[in-house]
Amino acid sequence: MKDDTAQRDDLIVGDGLVVSLAYSLRLDDGEEIDTAAGDDPLVYLHGAQNIIPGLERALAGLKIGDARSVTVSPDDAYGEMDPDAFELVPYDAFPGDLELEEGMGLRMVESGTGRQMEAYISELRDDGALLDLNHPLAGETLHFNVEVVGIRRATSEEVAHGHAHSEGHTH
Ligand code: ZN
């Protein structure tokens, strides 16, 4: 059976649908930190935890052309700041040619699991670099302006993978 994945005006956002979103994202202080235009939208599979829970909930039931302002608390976004998610790493654990700076982002591979994680240098101390393993948006209340610009049914492959495939790209 061929999957019918044409954009459909009669669909409303719900589980198993691929949704295209134009949005802007601001923090409490008004700083815009992310944006997607209508002609280059964020495309995600609804109901598959592709996006933060607070935003996913707010989008359910909308149709193409609907726009909303959505405020999402940290609990429904990237969580509160975890004061235990800091780690002091001795300087000899870093490559010698790497110039460390406070605020710098690092991609690290967790020994044992091989899981990739992002960390930020919170402080350069005498005995090593203090890494902050929290998500950069932990503790932030997020203010979205969103507009639904597309809705279509997901392919069976997308449902199996748990994410949307962009046009002409599958894996
Ligand atoms: Zn896939």
Image (spheres, helix red, strand yellow):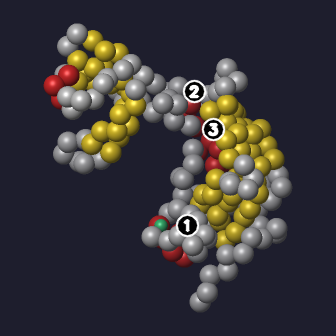
Q: Is mark 1 within 8 Å of ligand 1?
A: yes
Q: In which quarter of the image is residue 48?
A: bottom right
Q: Distance between the residues labelled 1 and 3?
A: 21 Å
The residue at 30%/47% (across/down) is 115
Can you identify the residue that label 3 sits on?
A: 34
Secondary structure beneath disc 3? strand
Q: Position of residue 74 (x, y in %)?
A: 56, 30
C-alpha separation, residue under disc 3 versus residue under disc 2:
14 Å
| Residue 91 shows in this picture | yes
Q: Earlier in the sequence, mark 3 or mark 2?
A: 3
Amino acid type shown at disc 1: His
Vertical placement of 130 versus 170: above or below? above
Are circles 2 and 1 on residues that touch, CB within 8 Å?
no
Tell me the quadrant of the picture where the C terminus can be found: bottom left
Q: Is mark 2 on a helix, strand or loop?
A: loop
The response on whether ligand 1 sits within 8 Å of label 2 is no
Under circle 1, the secondary element is loop
Task: First in sequence, mark 2 or 1: give its number.
Answer: 2
Residue drawn at x 64%, y 64% is 18
84 to the left or right of 142: left
Q: Which x, y percent locates residue 166?
A: 58, 65
Tag 3: residue type?
A: Asp
Front residue of 167 and 99: 99
Mark 1 — residue? 165
Camera-near label (2 vs 1) is: 1
Going from N to C along the chain, the mark reached first, 1 or 3, is 3
Residue under circle 2? 140
Q: What residue type is labelled 2?
A: Glu
- In the figure, residue 165 lies in which quadrant? bottom right
**Can you tell which of label 3 and label 2 is closer to the viewer?**
3
The local crowd at label 3, few if under 14, some if 14 to 19, many if 20 or more residues have their Cα within 10 Å, is: few
> Considering the image in quadrants, where does the N terminus appear?
bottom right
